[in-house]
Image: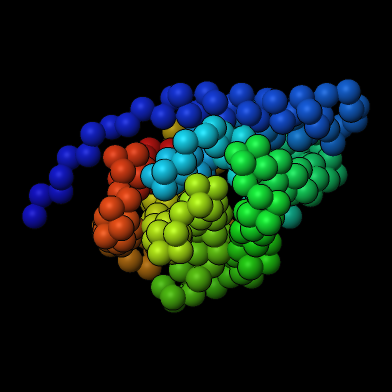
Amino acid sequence: MTEPVVAPVDFGADRTTVGRALEALMVRTLDGRDGVVYEAIRYALEGEGKRLRAILVMSAYRAAGGRGDASHLAAAVEVVHAYSLVHDDLPCMDDDDMRRGRPTVHVVHGVGAATAAGMAMVPLAARAAYEAAIGLGLTPEESLAIVHVLMRASGAGGMIGGQLLDLEAEGKSLSLEELERIHRLKTGALIEAAMRIGGLAARAPEGLLEAFGTYGASIGLAFQIADDVLDITATTDQLGKTAGKDVEYRKSTYPALLGVAGAKSRAEALVQEACQGLQAHGALTPELDFLARFVVARRS
C-alpha cells in the first residue's frame, strides 16, 4: 500500500521563538557572570540544531488545546538536550571534536569546563521549566510535575542510564531487545518527556498523555535507528559531527543487527505505531504527523 503524502510543515517560527527564549534565559542567568564555565554554557546553548525536542513540546501543547506561548518551556527541554551533547562528546565518552558543524565544547573551553557546564545545565533546565510552567498559568504542583518528568528523563532512569549501558556495551554483541533498551533510555526518554511535558502544560487528560508518551517513545527509538543508518551512509559534513563513530567504537547498531533495509523498515513501523496511537485520540495534527515522518527521512 502506498504511504500517504504528508505535506511539509514549516517550523521556522517555532525555531525562532525557541531561540529567543534560550537567549532570554541566558540573559537572565549568565549575563554579568564571568568564568569559563559560564562561557561554555553559553557556547553549548548557542549551537544551531534541529530543535526537535523543543518543537515537540510546542506541537504537543497545541495538539492538546494549549493557547499560550510554550517556547520558554520548550527551551528548558532544549537545555537538557544541549547538556547531553556536551557530555556525550567528552573524551571519556564518545570523544568527538565536532558537533553541529563546529568544534565541541570541550575542544573550545577545555574538558573541565565542559564537564562542569553540563552539570550546571541540569538545574538550570529545572529552574527554567518551573518558571515557564508558572508563566503559562499552571499551579506550583502542576509545574513541579513537569519538572519531575524532565528530570526523570535526564537521570539514571533515562539519558544517563542509557548512556551508561551504551558505554558498557562497546565491543559487545547485543540482541535487538538489549539494543532497544539502551536507546529507549538514551535517546527516547527525553523525546517522550517532551511530548508529555507539552501535554501536561495544556492539562491534557490522562489518556491523551499516555498516547503522547507512546508517540514520543516510538519516534525516539525511530530517531536513534535513523542515526545509526546515517552514521554509515552520510558524511561528516552532512551530519555536522564525525561519521563512522559506531564502527570505530565497535558498537552494536540497528544496521549491524538488521541490515540497512531492515533498520529502515523497523523505523518506519515505529512511526506508523506512533501516528496510529495519536489518531485514535483525534490528536494526530499535521505537525505531529510530519515530525514523526521527518525523524526517519532526515539527512542529518
Give above or below for 24 relative to 145: above
Q: Is residue 164 left or right of residue 245?
A: right
Identify which residue is drawn at 28% across, 53% down: 282
Identify which residue is drawn at 33% across, 66% down: 258
Residue 170 appears in which quarter of the rendering?
A: bottom right
Quadrant assignment for the C terminus: top left
x, y (%) of residue 103?
Answer: 66, 31
Residue 11 appears in which quarter of the rendering?
A: top left
Q: Is residue 285 left or right of residue 205?
A: left
Give above or below for 10 relative to 129: above
Whether residue 269 is visible here, answered yes or no, is yes
Q: Is residue 106 left or right of residue 239?
A: right
Whether residue 275 is visible here, answered yes or no, is no
In this view, the residue in front, 62 or 119, is 62
Identify which residue is drawn at 47% across, 36% down: 67
x, y (%) of residue 31?
Answer: 83, 24
x, y (%) of residue 155?
Answer: 68, 61
x, y (%) of residue 190?
Answer: 56, 54
Q: How is the image coloured?
A: rainbow
- Report the number of numbered marks: 0
Identify which residue is drawn at 38% across, 38% down: 299
Residue 142 appears in which quarter of the rendering?
A: bottom right
Give above or below for 6 relative to 273: above
Quadrant assignment for the N terminus: bottom left
